[in-house]
Image (cartoon, grey):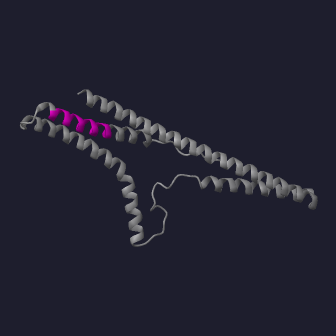
Amino acid sequence: MLTALTSLVSGGLTGILGAGVQRFADYKNKQLDLQAAREKAEHDIKLREADAAIMREEWAARTRVAEIEVAGKESAADAEAFAASFRLEPQRYSEGVKARGWQASALVLLDVLRGVVRPGLTIYLCAITTAIYFDARSILGDTPVDQAKALALLDGIIATILYLTTTVVLWWFGTRNKSAAPKIG
């Protein structure tokens, strides 16, 4: 009983820790992405300023203003294109793709597998935990094995399954509702 409780608590803590570590890693990756975007934007601004200085010498004041506006629009479009490269992978691989035949089927299959793995694993582990509980009750009632050894073995198996189940369930729900990626610009 104590081992099962310990497994539930430690599995839960591992699941929460895993979700926290994953969130922290996502946060750090986004910080790096934003820093890279800032550096690129600063570099682009410096290049545009140098271009504007050369243009001022060669063109009239009216032409200079028009060139600076164009440079600003290019910089904004460049920053948006750069930000788009850091967005998360698509929700569906088959969406918006003009594939035919087996390629379209493969993309749809990929979408199905991608959507089924985590909840399927969670349901499977919850079901196997329940099945082990009922099997353990029947084994202990029917087997003439030394009860202390049977209980120790059963306790270890149950502790492992409970640990895995609580880890997966808490990790799954801990990372399920991620907020949208921040937009640059």
Q: Is residue 112 above or below residue 6?
A: below
Residue 30 picture quarter: top right
Number of numbered labels in the structure image: 0
Q: Residue furthest top?
A: 2
Q: Is residue 153 magenta?
A: yes
Q: Is residue 62 visible?
A: no
Q: Is residue 66 above or below residue 97?
A: above
Q: Is residue 75 above or below residue 179?
A: below
Residue 114 picture quarter: bottom left
Q: Is residue 103 visible?
A: yes
Q: Position of residue 148 (x, y in %)?
A: 15, 30
Residue at figure coordinates x 74%, y 57% from the top left: 74
Between 55 and 65, which is closer to the camera in this rendering?
55
In the displayed structure image, the side of residue 103 where residue 50 appears, left or right = right
Q: Position of residue 180 (x, y in %)?
A: 53, 45
Residue at figure coordinates x 39%, y 71% from the top left: 102
* SS majority, magenta: helix
Q: Position of residue 104 (x, y in %)?
A: 41, 68
Residue 135 picture quarter: top left
Residue at figure coordinates x 80%, y 55% from the top left: 48
Report the quarter where the N terminus lies.
top left
In the displayed structure image, the side of residue 86 where residue 22 appears, left or right = left
Give the magenta range. 149-165
Between 172 and 52, which is closer to the camera in this rendering?
172
